[in-house]
Amino acid sequence: MLISHRPRTRQHGRARPQAGPPSGPDHGRQPWTALAVLGAAQFMVILDMTVVNVALPSISRSLDISPAGLPWVVTTYLLLTGGLMLLGGRAADVLGGRPMFLAGLAVFTLASLASGLAPAPAALIAARGAQGLGAALLSPAALAVITARYAGAQRTAALAAWGALASGGAAVGVVAGGLLTSGLGWRSVFLINVPVGIAAGLAARHVIPARAGRPASRPGRPGGARRLDVPGALLVVAGLGAVMIALSGTQQYGWAAARTIALLGAGAVLLAGFAVAERLAADPLLPPRTWRSRPLTAGMAVMLGATGISVGTFYLNTLYLQDVLGASPVIAGAEFLPMVAAIGVAAHLAGRLLPRLGARAVAVAGLVVVAGGTALLASLAGGGYGSAVLPGLLATGAGIGLVFPAATVSAMSAARAGREGLASGLTTTAHEIGAALGVAVFAAVGAAAGSGTGLAGAAAGLAAGYRHGFTVAAVVAGVLAIVALAAVPQVRPAAGHRTGLH
């Protein structure tokens, strides 16, 4: 599932909370209407990360998308969201939270309309990319407005509510995706965003003051768009996109084909170019010194890998439940709820274990449980939901619920004062990019073992692909456990430290 953890007092992207209460007419206790509007928009973004997955088989049949092309309906959105999230946070810093929120909401709403009306696979995938861009602008800007609008106990309560949105969005998404797809067709999972987006935009103009989230003046620093590292963001997206195109083509061209190797090489060159560009940039998205922090890089690596396994698990089981076991979209959505619940329960348990055992122990334990759960899914491939799928989903979800808070604590333990937003934004970026890579890798490995063309034609080989995919997931989880044992610090947050679902 698209869930990660971060301290509720931290911030998303590069937008930093103002110190002290708001000044001027906003001083004092503020009405909750602004939070309600911002929360509604963010809930829509979170919902869109999960609601689409249940509709994938119906989308494939309707638009005749091949198994190699189907993952792009998910990964394009995640790639643009994750790749541009830091840029969105910086834009909120530089240009202001309110205007960036409204711009992101407008892009997301229009892209949702285009997705719902898409006549062909290419149009749908392009619209999904635009949705990702809108989400990358909207989410950090909304959080910037919240931290500027509220102070003290109100800010704490607002951030707690913000964190709770993700857990609710994940649970609602798997059910709503099935209900909408079965009752109104797959296009409704996108079109439902349009009236919500319009209403949120109109309300935001009335309840969010123009000064909310206004960029702070910093003497001696160039202003406006010149402080936005757009080239760096584009290099990241292009490099990761090349890698994903290579992975998606492995079924047709093979892993050793010249095309695959060339695309992987191009991706590596583009990502290396990003590293060089960040060293040369006056105001880089990702300062080069960031990579010298082992706790931060270890936390990001664990977050990326664990999210990839989590979302890949959701992707393969969406196809397996509907195209092999014959579940309807509604039933398939409901069958994911135990995994969502397991993640939430384990995350709560992790909050109690971290002060006692430390981040390293909890991360390693969680990854071992994930390895066991995915190995169980691989070994029982071909069985029914209750006997084969459910036990593996519960174990995998429980492990993921332990890993996410531990990875976040590791990453945030290295954050210096004034750099909490960067560390939080990097952790969130690792989550989104990990989700995109997870779908791409699982789809490529699963498709390599499949047969036939089209989703229905590939159903006979899906069980074999399912087995291969989860075998790889178990190996990856085991490797990550070794990485966590070696690199994650044994930091223990203070008792009562709270993490929220994001």
Image: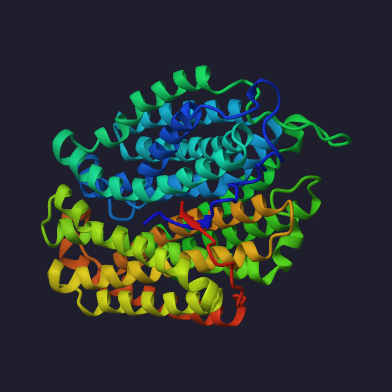
Is 303 above or below relative to 378?
above
Residue 161: x and y in percent read 45, 43
Is 484 above or below relative to 210?
below
Query: Residue 147 occupies which quadrant of the picture?
Result: top right
Residue 99: x and y in percent read 60, 25
Query: Residue 388 occupies which quadrant of the picture?
Result: bottom left
Left or right: 255, with 241 as reference point = left
Counting the numbered discs, the total is: 0
Q: Is residue 383 visible?
A: no
Left or right: 288, with 345 as reference point = right
Is 26 above or below relative to 156?
above
Image quarter in which the N terminus is found: bottom left
Residue reaching furthest to the right = 220
Q: How is the image coloured?
A: rainbow
Q: Residue at x 26, y 48 (%)?
A: 56
Q: Residue at x 18, y 60 (%)?
A: 321
Residue 74: x and y in percent read 37, 49
Residue 435: x and y in percent read 44, 57
Depth check: give the residue in front, 83 or 449: 83
Depth check: give the residue in front, 499 or 296: 499
Q: Residue at x 31, y 79 (%)?
A: 375
Depth check: give the residue in front, 70 or 407: 407
Q: Residue at x 52, y 39 (%)?
A: 139
Q: Is residue 6 visible?
A: yes
Depth check: give the residue in front, 370 or 188: 370
Left or right: 5, with 310 as reference point = right
Query: Residue 335 occupies which quadrant of the picture?
Result: bottom left
Left or right: 287, with 11 as reference point = right
Is 188 above or below relative to 372?
above
